[in-house]
Image (cartoon, helix red, strand yellow):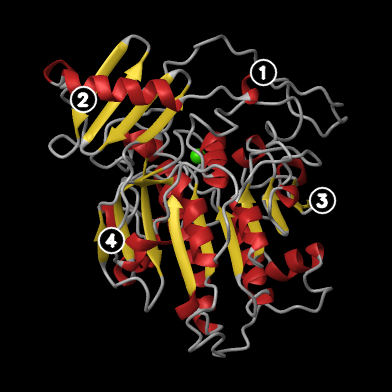
């Protein structure tokens, strides 16, 4: 992509701004009380097995691996859900899927998704109250343009990207959104000129530069490696013997995202923000099926994949770096999940959490201190339920209940429920108390459908059409 053309088209050059650094100025050096910047990078459908630091051999991710080497890697971190929208609802709200608002990927007949209600607590809003400048750059999926679920109304001062999840199924969309303005791209009629992922990276770099002197929170939900498998260059994989085009494209996408994680890390360093910036990289759900899963063992040693409540659908890679605060090369088996991020960010920024959260701050884990543990973690999706309690993992799908000992059986192969009636009883009690109905279940879009701006009419869903586990 031609960066200059993009910048001109989108007004960045017009504003007289530069992406070049002003180099090496240490902001906040020596000020221990300074609120840290937070950069939370979310991949899309990247599985537990897709990164070098989690055992991947074929796809190169040196920059993300470096975050782990210079910081911490979590072995038992979990996404909010097994698919995109509910996982993001959990993340933003700090509530698990038994309590959060959005519980599935429901299509609307317009560009966008079921919107978060106006009074929703989000980590963006929480951090705004502590004086943070906040941005969401990437894929949103929790509203439609102008709705109560618009990112600008849900705690983000600056917003750029795909409002609608389905439009993110192409990396060459006709448009993206910057706040309430549609940004037209040069991809009309199937042209492939502006690669959305690259634009997100440029926007992220610009946001960091613009806000280097104040505490900022950058939520960067990238769309890689979600399908379609489109990438401008195959890079180091172009001449891989015996690899299909799909395999090359998937690897090149992930390595491109890794390159950009490295570019962001370099900018942070160049701006002198290294010691005062926490960078987190994780993924919104497990490996998707198809090539991501089969060609690269996307779930690693885990059973299942995206859409499943087996570990492969929900356990996520999580690495974080904060020089001087997080000990180099740390590894933690703390059982944590997306709903922990809201209280974690709040503690880091000195913000008050005024509404309910299911999360527990992970700051002690990051800093190598004694951490309060969860009694259990809970998920529900399309009628299936799952609980992680200590070493135990239970799945309740339709009439089948299964129990696994993850210490001995990370691949969830051997159902131990009949040997452990007391554990089964405890977990059934947890399941019974963890679900609360959500108005999302009955929400209906009643607004106008704009000419040319809408979506194809969604197919009618049959109830329980999809098997809820694998
Ligand atoms: Ca996803």
User: Between disc 4 and disc 1, whose residue precedes?
Assistant: 4
Q: Quadrant of the N terminus?
A: bottom right
- Disc nearer the start of the sequence (2/1): 2
Residue 115 visible to the viewer? yes
- Badges 4 and 2: C-beta atoms under 8 Å apart? no
* Label 3: which secondary element: loop
Mark 4 lies on residue:
370
Residue at image position (68%, 31%) is: 114
Query: 313 and 149: which one is in front?
Result: 149
The residue lying at 42 percent from left, 16 percent from top is 467
The residue lying toward the viewer, choosing from 126 and 295, is 126
Between disc 3 and disc 2, whose residue precedes?
A: 3
Q: Closer to us: mark 4 or mark 3? A: 4
Q: Residues within 10 Å of mark 2 (few under 14, many from 20)?
A: some
Q: CA distance from mark 4 to mark 2?
A: 26 Å
Nearer the observer: mark 3 or 2; the answer is 2
Q: Quadrant of residue 34?
A: bottom right
Q: Which residue is mark 3?
A: 180
Residue 458 spot, x, y in % from top left: 68, 20
Dot 4 and dot 3 residues touching (CB under 8 Å): no
Give the quadrant of the C terminus.
top left
The residue tagged 2 is 423
> Which badge, 1 or 3, comes first in the chain's sequence?
3
* Pointer 2 residue Cβ closer than 8 Å to ligand 1: no
Identify which residue, 360 or 229, lies in the foreground: 360
The answer to whether any part of residue 195 appears in the image is no
Task: Give the CA separation, mark 4 to mark 1.
Answer: 43 Å
Are circles 1 and 3 on residues that touch, CB within 8 Å?
no
| Label placed on residue 442 | 1
Mark 4: secondary structure: loop
- Residue 394 position (above or below residue 282): above
């Amino acid at each position: 992509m031609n960066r200059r053309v993009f910048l001109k088209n989108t007004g960045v050059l017009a504003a007289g701004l530069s992406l070049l650094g002003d180099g090496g100025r240490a902001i906040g050096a020596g000020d221990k009380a300074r609120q840290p910047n937070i950069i939370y990078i979310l991949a899309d459908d990247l599985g537990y097995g897709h990164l070098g630091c989690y055992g991947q051999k074929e796809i190169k991710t040196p920059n993300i691996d470096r975050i782990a080497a210079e910081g911490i890697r979590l072995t038992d971190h979990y996404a909010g859900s097994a698919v995109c929208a509910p996982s993001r609802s959990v993340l933003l709200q700090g509530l698990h899927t038994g309590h959060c608002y959005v519980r599935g990927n429901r299509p609307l007949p317009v560009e966008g998704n079921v919107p978060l209600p106006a009074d929703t607590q989000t980590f963006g809003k929480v951090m705004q109250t502590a004086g943070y400048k906040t941005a969401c750059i990437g894929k949103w999926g929790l509203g439609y343009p102008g709705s109560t679920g618009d990112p600008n109304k849900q705690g983000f001062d600056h917003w750029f990207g795909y409002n609608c999840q389905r439009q993110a199924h192409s990396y060459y969309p006709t448009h993206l959104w910057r706040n309430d303005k549609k940004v037209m791209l040069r991809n009309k009629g199937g042209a492939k000129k502006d690669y959305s992922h690259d634009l997100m990276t440029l926007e992220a770099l610009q946001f960091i530069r613009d806000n280097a002197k104040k505490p900022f929170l950058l939520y960067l939900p990238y769309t890689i490696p979600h399908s379609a498998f489109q990438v401008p260059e195959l890079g180091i994989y172009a001449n891989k013997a015996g690899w299909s085009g799909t395999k090359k494209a998937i690897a090149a996408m992930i390595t491109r995202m890794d390159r950009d994680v490295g570019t962001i890390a370099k900018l942070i360093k160049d701006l002198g923000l290294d010691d005062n910036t926490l960078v987190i990289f994780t993924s919104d759900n497990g490996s998707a099926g198809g090539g991501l899963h089969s060609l690269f063992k996307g779930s690693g040693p885990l059973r299942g994949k995206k859409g499943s409540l087996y570990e492969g659908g929900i356990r996520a890679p999580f690495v974080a770096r904060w020089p001087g605060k997080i000990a180099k090369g740390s590894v933690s088996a703390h059982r944590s999940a997306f709903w922990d991020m809201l209280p974690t960010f709040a503690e880091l920024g000195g913000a008050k959490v005024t509404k309910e959260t299911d999360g527990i701050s992970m700051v002690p884990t990051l800093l190598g201190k004694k951490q309060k543990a969860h009694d259990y973690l809970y998920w529900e999706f399309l009628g299936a339920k799952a609980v992680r309690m200590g070493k135990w993992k239970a799945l309740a799908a339709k009439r089948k209940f299964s129990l696994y000992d993850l210490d001995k059986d990370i691949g969830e192969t051997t159902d131990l429920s009949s040997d452990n009636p007391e554990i089964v009883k405890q977990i059934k009690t947890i399941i019974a108390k963890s679900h609360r109905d959500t108005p999302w279940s009955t929400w209906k879009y009643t607004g106008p459908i704009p000419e040319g701006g809408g979506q194809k009419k969604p197919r009618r869903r049959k109830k329980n059409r999809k098997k809820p586990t694998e």
